[in-house]
Image (tube, rainbow, N blue to C red):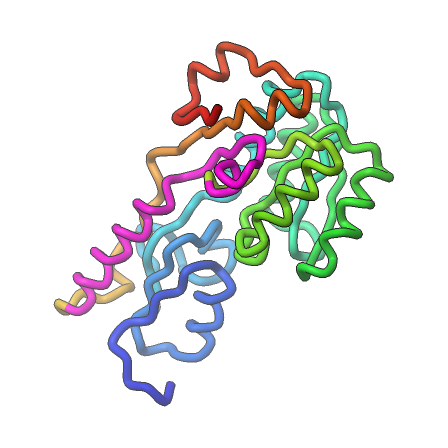
Amino acid sequence: MQRKVDVIIGLARPLAAAAKQATSTIPIVMVTVGDPVGAGLVESLPRPGGNITGLSVMTVEVTAKSLQILKEAVPRASRVAVLQSWVGRSPVAKEVESAAQTLGIQVQIVVAQSPEALDEAFSSMIRGRADALLVHSDPMFFLHQTRLVELAAKARLPAIFSASEYVRAGGFMSYAPNFLYNFRRAAVYVDKILKGAKPADLPVEQPTKFELVINLKTAKALGLTIPPSLLARADQVIE
């Protein structure tokens, strides 16, 4: 590292992994990494080891729960497309497949590794006769959230997203941790490290609060009626 920085912030898994590869001495604080142990970033959540710690967003558990919520919102859905940016099966994909089997849902894995691949990804969903869509948490998807929301609307696919920003942009629904809280907590980690704490001794935090956001305007456009029981559990309803 040419610049002698005191701490590096790794917002998501790719950035945290790149930082860890670049240095084994400068402390790294991750903010929204889904499975830091599975990604090889830390040895364990209670004792991270090495030079990296921070916050996890429990992607595996959240994604499985998202599929359950999507099925509750769209009971007719028997085939759900799952949009991801990586090739191959991950712990998240395995958990989704397990949850889908329990719910009696068929899963269609669709890969888009670049913004240019999104159009073909949605064409693949349509050819596969998907009834609904689950979008994995991914920095690239988040950056192109407006495009994703537009494509889902054009394909008339009820979609559940990994951040509430998608829903505020017109998406159907989201289920996710409060990411703003993660950023605030990341500042606490930075403060502790600057005061002498070692990343190896700072346990990785997992979220304790998850937010369900539903866009009723989008539901109406899709011809869907949200069950009252689901509306009652929503943290925010956009009308």
Q: Residue furthest bottom?
A: 2
Q: Is residue 158 left or right of residue 20?
A: right
Q: Residue at x 31, y 56 (%)?
A: 47
Q: Residue at x 37, y 40 (%)?
A: 178
Tell me if I can see residue 42 in this picture: yes
Vertical placement of residue 55 versus 155, above or below: below
Vertical placement of residue 21 versus 117, above or below: below
Q: Residue at x 18, y 62 (%)?
A: 191
Q: Is residue 175 left or right of residue 102?
A: left
Q: Which residues are magenta?
A: 165-194
Q: Residue at x 61, y 14 (%)?
A: 225
Q: Residue furthest top?
A: 228
The residue lying toward the viewer, choosing from 192 and 11, is 11
Residue 44 percent coordinates (x, y):
39, 54
Vertical placement of residue 216 versus 165, above or below: above
Does the magenta-highlighted stretch encompass residue 182?
Answer: yes
Vertical placement of residue 228 versus 127, above or below: above
Give the position of the N terminus as an image quadrant.
bottom left
Q: Main secondary structure of the magenta part?
A: helix
The residue lying toward the viewer, choosing from 139 and 116, is 116
